[in-house]
Amino acid sequence: MTITNKQACITHAGKNFVNELLGMLDGAEGVEATGCGDITWVRNEGEKNSYTILIEAKDGSFNQVRPKCYCVTIGRETVAIERLDGTHTVPSGRYFVIPPNKLVRFAVGKRGQHHVDPIACMGFSMKSKWVEGFVTDYSNLRDAIIAAYLEGEKDIEAKAFVTARKNEWIKQLADNAKAFSKI
């Protein structure tokens, strides 16, 4: 399966990375551009081990990351190389697989990106010290994704926080709609 223009990803480079992930993850599909995730990966490993993992893929930077989606965030580090036809970026071989609960906990108290609330949207560097604990390589990517998902599912407090925050936004939007309808 290949990502189309109607599906997620902001950049061409992002689409290439998502397509690579789709090729390696059996049962994975690209999602419509909803602002939450790029891939759904259905895992059926017996009756008690069946789950659907929502994945957000970032190629080269953690730009416009959305903790509100409570999904596994995968970053692929890239490096710039000079060629005769200009500067190009290529994968470095390092990947970051961040559990959703760790991303939510990191976001609290940070500055938002394109939004005042970092839970809605934030950015951070792949050189940030806190992401070093989530480094893996291509050969371990599948296992790291599953482990990150399972860790996030166990953190009831972080999941509840995100749900409560989303409910606050929904109420605020409804209140704003009422207020604007009176103008």
Image (cartoon, rainbow, N blue to C red):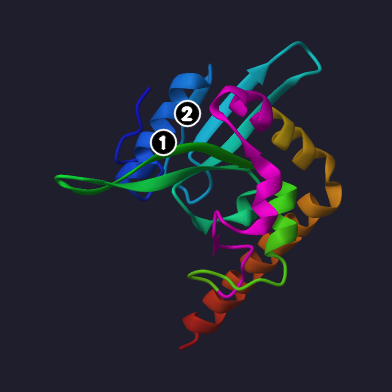
Q: Quadrant of residue 8?
A: top left
Residue at 15% across, 45% down: 84
Query: Taking 143 as reference, is 70 above or below it?
Result: below
Where disc 2 sits, the SS reads helix
Query: Is 147 placed left or right of 9 in the picture?
Result: right
Q: Are marks 2 and 1 in contact (CB under 8 Å)?
A: yes
According to the image, label 2 marks what residue? Answer: 21
The image shows residue 18 at horizontal and vertical percentages of: 43, 34
Q: Is residue 100 magenta?
A: no
Question: Does any portion of residue 99 appear in the rendered image?
Answer: no
Query: Is 87 placed left or right of 92 in the picture?
Result: left
In this orientation, which residue lies closer to the viewer: 130 or 146? 130
Density class for disc 2 (Cα within 10 Å; few <14, some 14-19, many ≥20) is many
Circle 1: residue type: Phe
Q: Quadrant of residue 30?
A: top left
Q: How many marks?
A: 2
Question: Does any portion of residue 78 appear in the rendered image?
Answer: yes
Residue at 47% across, 53% down: 61
Circle 2: residue type: Leu
From which residue to which does the magenta span run? 116-145
According to the image, label 1 marks what residue? Answer: 17
Where disc 1 sits, the SS reads helix
- Measured Cα–Cα span from mark 2 to mark 1: 6 Å
The image shows residue 17 at horizontal and vertical percentages of: 41, 36
